[in-house]
Amino acid sequence: MTVKVRFDKEVREYAKGEKVKDDVLRLTETALAQALEKFHRRMILIEGDTPRKAELAGILAGASARVLSDALEELKKKRLRDESEDGIQVLYATDALGEDTFGRKRYEAFRKHFDVLAGSNADVKAVTFKHTRDILGRTYDLLVLDMSYDYSPNDLGRIIETVRGGGLIFILAHPFEKWKKMWTGFHKSLVTPPYTIDDVKKRFNRRIIRKFTKYDGIYIITENGKLRKKPKRNKTQAKIKGRRGVEIPGETVFPRELYEMALTEGQVEVLRAFEGLVEEEGMLVLTADRGRGKSVSVGIAAIGLALALNKRTRIVVTAPEPENVQALFRFAKRALEKLGFKPYVVEEKGLIKELYARKIGLRYYPPAEGYRKSADLYILDEAAGIHVPILHKYLDKPRVVYSSTIHGYEGAGRGFSVKFLKKAREKREFKELHMDEPIRYAEGDPIEKWLFDVLLLDAEPVELTEEDYELIKNKEVYFEEPDLDDWFEHDREDLRNFVGIYILAHYRNRPSDVALLADAPHHEARVLRLKNGKIVTAVQIAKEGGIPKKVIEKMAKGYKPRGNIIPDMMVKHHMLKEFAKLKGYRIVRIATHPDAMDMGLGSKALELLEKEAREKGLDWIGSGFGASEELARFWVKNGFAVVHLSPARNPVSGEFTAIVLKPISERAKRLIRQASDEFRIRLTEWLGDTHRELEPEIARWLFETPFGEAVDYPIHLTDVQKKRLDAFTGKVLTYDTVLDAVKPIVKLYFLDGWMKPYLDERQIKLLIYRVLQAHSWEETAKLIDRTETFTMIEVRDIIRGLWYYYKRLL
């Protein structure tokens, strides 16, 4: 059916009275007609310096809401809108809505005209960028995005993706020439001592402006009605095509009402796959690009499975953040209501955390907690945003579903495939499904293309050939500081390759990371290139230190300066004010091409970065990372000393954060050596308390030191303790009666230098787990897969060797 997309006489007269040119109305009609016909989104950017741009957005959005309201029934018939949706949903997003703020004034200017024209069928929700979590999982017809002052790239992606096909996006912006030169609130957050706002770059502003002008489907006007970028021809009607019909299978295990909720064949396939988990336990992996209805399908299917199991069913739902699973919970609730249940919802800060109906319970847990709970089904949504070791913890669950976005803000699905699925295949069989057909908007949407490009969401590393592997093997590489002005201004392929390496190698990437690299005064890039120019290792560094004396004194009293993570830690945890004056590089991220891992490229990049730092007269290089065994070993083997470990695990990655340092100047060497010694002393105590659950295979690497000398730490044993140790090693006394004498000897071993007695990996783990972490004999025996008696004998033998060695020193 063809829908008329022409603003009525009343709208035109109102617009004329507000001095809105007919050209502007025709452009808006055309954009809306294109959006409805293609089931895409269209964007209208309004440049201006005054509240007039918000007034103009109010008039154009109000007029558009009228047309959409008239077309609503037709959209429902064509299954492009849900039956339950009655009104036109409008979102207004800005940096501030507090009284007397400019953001509030622009919002009021918008509402003044919108409310007159839109009619009672439009529902407006206003949010600040800080509270965009409230809108995740929701869908809107019209969006007004106020980018006049503050926004972060994270906000941009999150907000724009809430608009459905047939919808319009109005952007309020400063005139481009002014915008190119201005600092936003995001820029102010990048200022860190000793830098000032004048040092902050504006590359990201220029990038986003350039992309607005490049893509089709984005129109640009000024607040005075000048058309800067317009459609090729005007359009006043839209031929609305219905969504392709969905074939419901003849026989289904789940109620047909649930199948009727499916909008695409992909969603039907998900329901069928979940049906397969009723009779037999199993694992399901589901991937999709954004807007394919993945989370929605999982929410509906989870209810189908719970009913089919025909018993009290408990479902654990996890994702990097509770925001990620709001669509899942909302559609699970809708599925229950469709089946006649009255679900009970538990919300926290406006987010659904729990959902209950007769004998059915769904509950959200953070990733590092969910696997500890017993349940009939475990759902990991946005699995690419969850750290790989945590994903492995769910692998042995009888029924488990991993669901992930391929390109998006929650992490990169390809990284998930490269790093997790490869290993998962070795452990168990599973069914894989990929959802192609978009639900929120049709294939080829120009706004999606624009967004992916501007935020580099689909960036990928360069492909490697056989010749490249030869170059890698022979280490025919060179280290380089790329020209970021050139990368960002000329949209170099190198930038996409650089970011692509991070997307595939790191479990969590945010769009703001690109803007941070572009504009932060203390952030720089380094690359390891093959002789032929291909980037194989990406390094992002932050310049830290060189902090003024006044700021250092404030830091010692609790002040936390932005961006100086390592100096701040050294001042607060090691009382080394002197260290904050020194300058160094903090390695923010280092990643190697996923097809060239474990070939020594990361270590080579560190070696060349150290050489550069030495030539530039810096004092140290360091890094902070999630402490896994693999990473702890990597940093220690490259000559870095561990100087700090966070007291709590990261709720998403489930890891403690470690900080490592490598000295370059003599002054830094003295301070880092002191910090390393102090940390090792602390760790011997922390393992029995704060870090009792730290994996012993990680702890053993944290004790390693590049300095090679023993810690100067007095260990005292009384004569009676020494005699009791003799009695223990001579099999007269038991371990539990001489623990007070054993522990100092074990401490002595871990605080010793390179001349300490040799123990193998298993013996080291045993000492950490049983002696320093005080786990029971039963737990310790389980760790090494032996009987308790065997474990007791082995511990006694290790202590006998250590006591024989250290006896003469005491």
Image (cartoon, rainbow, N blue to C red):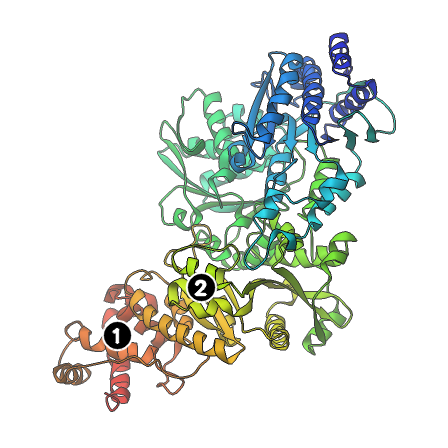
Closest to the observer: 122 or 36? 122
Q: Is residue 366 above or below residue 10?
A: below
Q: Is residue 656 visible?
A: no
Q: Which mark is residue 131?
A: none
Q: Is residue 518 above or below residue 123?
A: below
**Which quadrant of the structure image shows residue 230?**
top right
**Which quadrant of the structure image shows residue 498?**
bottom right
Marks 2 and 1 sit apart, C-alpha to C-alpha, by: 34 Å
Query: Comparing marks 2 and 1, which lies closer to the viewer?
Result: 2
Residue sitting at 70 percent across and 15 percent down? 71
Residue sitting at 38 percent across and 83 percent down? 753
Q: Earlier in the sequence, mark 2 or mark 1?
A: 2
* Left or right: 712, with 11 as reference point: left
Mark 2 sits on what residue? 658
Mark 1 sits on what residue? 790
In the rendering, at what x and y percent does residue 367 appear?
Answer: 44, 48
* Left or right: 719, with 567 as reference point: left
In the rendering, at what x and y percent does residue 148 appear?
Answer: 66, 35
**Which quadrant of the structure image shows residue 768?**
bottom left
Callout 1 amino acid: Phe
Q: Secondary structure at mark 2?
A: strand
In the rendering, at what x and y percent does residue 619 appear?
Answer: 54, 74
Q: Secondary structure at mark 1?
A: helix
> Are discs 2 and 1 less than 8 Å apart at CB?
no
The C terminus lies in which quarter of the figure?
bottom left
